[in-house]
Image (cartoon, rainbow, N blue to C red):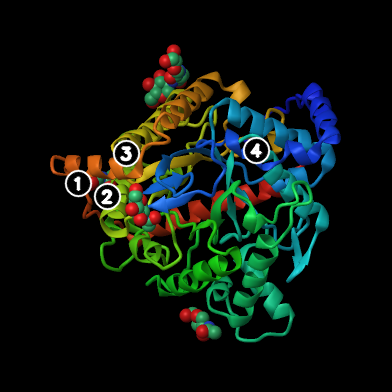
Amino acid sequence: MARPRRPGVLPATLLLLFLAASAAAPWRQYGLAAVAAAPDGGGGFVGVNGTQFVMGSGGTKTVYFSGFNAYWLMLVASDPARRAKVVAAFRQASDHGLNLARTWAFSDGGETPLQVSPGVYDEAMFQGLDFVIAEARRHGIYLLLCLVNNFHDFGGKRQYVAWAREAGHGGLATADDFFNSTVVKGYYKDHVKAVLTRVNTVTGVAYREDPTILGWELMNEPRCDADPTGAMVQAWVEEMAPYVKSIDGDKHLVTAGLEGFYGAGAHESKDLNPWGIYYGTNYVGTHRAAGVDFATIHLYPDVWLWGSGAAAKLAFLRNWTRSHAAATELYLGKPLLVTEYGKFLWEGVAGANRTQRDRFLDLVLDSIYDSAAEGGPLVGGAFWQLLDPGMDTLRDGYEIILPEDRHAAGIIGNHSRQLAQLNGQDVDAVRRRRRRSARSRKVHVGSSGRSSSSDTRQLHMLLVRFISLFRSVSSLFSSV
Ligand SMILES: *[C@@H]1O[C@H](CO)[C@@H](O)[C@H](O)[C@H]1NC(C)=O
Ligand SMILES: *[C@@H]1O[C@H](CO)[C@@H](O)[C@H](O)[C@H]1NC(C)=O
Ligand SMILES: *[C@@H]1O[C@H](CO)[C@@H](O)[C@H](O)[C@H]1NC(C)=O
Ligand SMILES: *[C@@H]1O[C@H](CO)[C@@H](O)[C@H](O)[C@H]1NC(C)=O
Ligand SMILES: *[C@@H]1O[C@H](CO)[C@@H](O)[C@H](O)[C@H]1NC(C)=O
């Protein structure tokens, strides 16, 4: 999987222009007026009305999200010498009509921490996050900020539990104690408070007051082996979502960060989970929790259906998006975002060629557009992951480098423009239209009745762990 290194293309001119501009009038440059570049032109917080995101005064105009993931933004921006990468990423994104970036507002312990130890923060890293938020605002891009990781990358729940153990607290057995230890929950709440009350050193705006932020994601991909029923994650979300809102003053939206695996509760379609696996989360149940404003799913047919043929992966993709859209509309009445979707593009790996990757993008983006155009609950997404040219150490096979990948850039740019044309509709009109068409629409809440042996299940778990390990190893060696 080693790749030839390419020399970094440093946009020196851009950097100079940027430095000149920010030296001249940093305050004005990052002022609220910049948010007018955002879809509504109104500069307010994004809200939710039924299954739609809304903007503007009174919150009656719809807004849709064409987004990307770039977990590395804060890390790279923490080094002022590398900030041009962050500027370039936002510029490329806005050139392609992208209006949402999902990124990490955490890095717990380890070699490049935001949170060095409970309640102790690295100021350079925080200033990196300040810069990211300021740049997002300047480019009219909303941010979905994630507050902790389920996995070991950048610390995660395991680091939190280790901190509690090091502080002498007993009774902590596994990383899943993150979800129910009083001490660890206290650490997490302190982190929430530290991030939300942070005053941005670039813009002067407290994070909790900043409309650039679409919302807070409680955790990246919560999973809990310790409690397959989903009750532990459920209780954690029920405690943390209202807590975030209490610090935030209920200005921003909150979501749990789920991948969409169904569990065992009411209205769950567990048979649709790849390989019949479940991970201690309930898609419907947990998204119903008070304080959770919108639902999320992730979509990785290659990893989740490792070894299956293209047709099976395609069928899965369709079922996964359709069943979640249907369940979201019927049982949640909230908007739904595909906050991560990705397909390997590794030359030489069977089933991972560019044609297939582009077809995957087309399919996902079409399903988002079709839903949005019909007033459905699936109203946006964010691909995994956007890189700038020359960031070879962060390549993971899923990267999309817009300036180097004209076809993917065309698909994404076209989708963004198409989706943006739906912005600004009256939410009531959308709802009325939806009700009228519901009579003729056939709703699928599919269940495949498929089963799988525990052997294949375990093999799949191993593969998923291998991929996370690969991701963490590559992030360890990430000098950009
Ligand atoms: C947390 O859950 C685990 C697994 O169910 C259990 O062993 C442990 O006792 C619980 N801890 C607390 C503090 O409730
Ligand atoms: C990519 O894969 C598809 C389906 O397997 C195949 O039809 C096509 O020829 C491949 N394209 C290239 C450029 O290898
Ligand atoms: C994007 O849209 C333009 C204009 O409709 C079209 O010419 C082009 O082929 C599209 N690009 C892709 C990759 O679909
Ligand atoms: C949704 O919008 C309608 C008007 O378009 C309004 O009457 C209703 O109160 C709104 N609901 C919420 C929860 O904001
Ligand atoms: C998709 O859903 C249909 C209908 O519910 C079912 O027959 C089929 O097995 C499902 N396929 C997959 C790959 O989940």
Residue indicated by mark 2 = 326
Mark with earlier residue (1, 4): 4
Q: Work out how far the residue at label 1 is from the one at label 4, CA to CA, in angstroms.
A: 42 Å
Q: Work out how far the residue at label 3 is from the one at label 2, CA to CA, in angstroms.
A: 10 Å
Q: Which mark is residue 220?
A: none
Q: Secondary structure at mark 3?
A: helix
Q: Work out how far the residue at label 2 is from the one at label 4, CA to CA, in angstroms.
A: 38 Å
At 55% from the left and 19% from the top, the residue drawn is 406
Q: Secondary structure at mark 2?
A: helix
Three-letter amino acid code of the residue under disc 1: Val
Q: Work out how far the residue at label 1 is from the one at label 3, CA to CA, in angstroms.
A: 12 Å
Which of discs 1 and 4 lies nearer the camera? The answer is 4
Q: Position of residue 137 (x, y in %)?
A: 65, 40
Three-letter amino acid code of the residue under disc 4: Ala
Mark with earlier residue (3, 2): 2
Three-letter amino acid code of the residue under disc 3: Ser
Task: Check if mark 3's residue and mark 2's residue have beta carbons within 8 Å.
Answer: no
Task: Check if mark 1's residue and mark 3's residue have beta carbons within 8 Å.
Answer: no
Mark with earlier residue (2, 1): 2
143 or 232, which is in the foreground?
A: 143
Q: Position of residue 426 (x, y in %)?
A: 35, 40
66 or 323, which is in the foreground?
A: 66
Residue indicated by mark 3 = 371
Q: Mark 4: give few (<14), some (14-19) or many (20+) Cα within 10 Å.
A: some
Q: Work out how far the residue at label 2 is from the one at label 1, CA to CA, in angstroms.
A: 6 Å
Residue indicated by mark 1 = 443
Q: Position of residue 35 (x, y in %)?
A: 61, 39
Task: Check if mark 2's residue and mark 4's residue have beta carbons within 8 Å.
Answer: no
Residue indicated by mark 4 = 33
Q: Is residue 340 above or below residue 16?
A: below
